[in-house]
Amino acid sequence: MHPVAAILILSCWLFAATNLDDLLVLVAFYASPAYSNLQIVAGHYLGMAVLFGVGLAFSLLKVALPAGAVGWLGLIPIAIGAKKLWELRRNLAPAAAEPGRPKPGLARPLVVAAVCLSNGGDNLAVYSSQFALRSGGDVAVMGLAFAALTGLWCLLAAGILTHPALGRAVRVNGHRWMPWGLIALGLWTLHGAGVI
């Protein structure tokens, strides 16, 4: 097998293994009328770029990641989910106030990026260890593959909303499910890192 093909296969496997849960989070963001497609894609790319960059930096510095330290990032989606629950309770959620009208600005992409980062403890651990074993060329190929797969993940998540059976339920109730999903994601991150 050609070395580049082997790196591409490894990249696809690593990305899918560490980002399967991100697909569900992206679906929740796409279901929320408060976020535009551009805000979601930009935020997810920003989050993945930071994870890639930090993983690369850690590999160059040969830094071992203490699981507990990364696990505390789980508090970010819990806080965002709690805020969204409060807004729903007070009937101030963007979906209830202005359906289909996302607000412009950087705040929404940064929220998407923060959720991506908070769920990225496994990404950092896997990426840094793999990058430390690879040449600069291999890491560059992995970076290009991750960029393409990030776009594919966004397309898949958006496509779920057009699914005949799932799409309507997600579009109608997604803004109600999203806070609970974010809180569950945060708890999963805290538990997986041994914090709780």
Image (cartoon, helix red, strand yellow):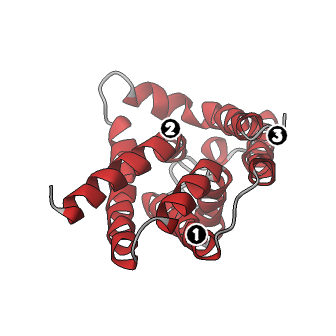
Q: Amino acid at mark 1?
A: Ser
Residue extending furthest toward the top:
165
Q: Position of residue 50 (x, y in %)?
A: 58, 69
Mark 2 residue element: helix
Mark 1 residue element: helix
Residue extending furthest toward the left:
1
Which of the image's four quarters has the N terminus? bottom left
Q: Amino acid at mark 3?
A: Trp
Q: Residue at x 33, y 77 (%)?
A: 137
Q: Which mark is residue 59?
A: 1
Q: Position of residue 90 (x, y in %)?
A: 82, 38
Q: Amino acid at mark 2?
A: Leu
Where does label 3 land, which residue?
86
Q: Position of residue 133 (x, y in %)?
A: 46, 64
Q: Is residue 94 visible?
A: yes
Q: Is residue 72 positioned above or below 41 on the image?
A: above
Res. 35 image quadrant: bottom right
Are the residues tagged 1 and 2 within 8 Å (C-beta)?
no
Q: Which mark is residue 24?
A: 2
**Alpha-carbon distance for marks 1 and 2?**
28 Å
**Alpha-carbon distance for marks 1 and 3?**
40 Å
**Frontmost residue, 183 versus 149:** 149
**Alpha-carbon distance for marks 3 and 2?**
22 Å
Residue 152 falls left or right of residue 124: left
**Which label sits in the foreground, 3 or 2?**
2
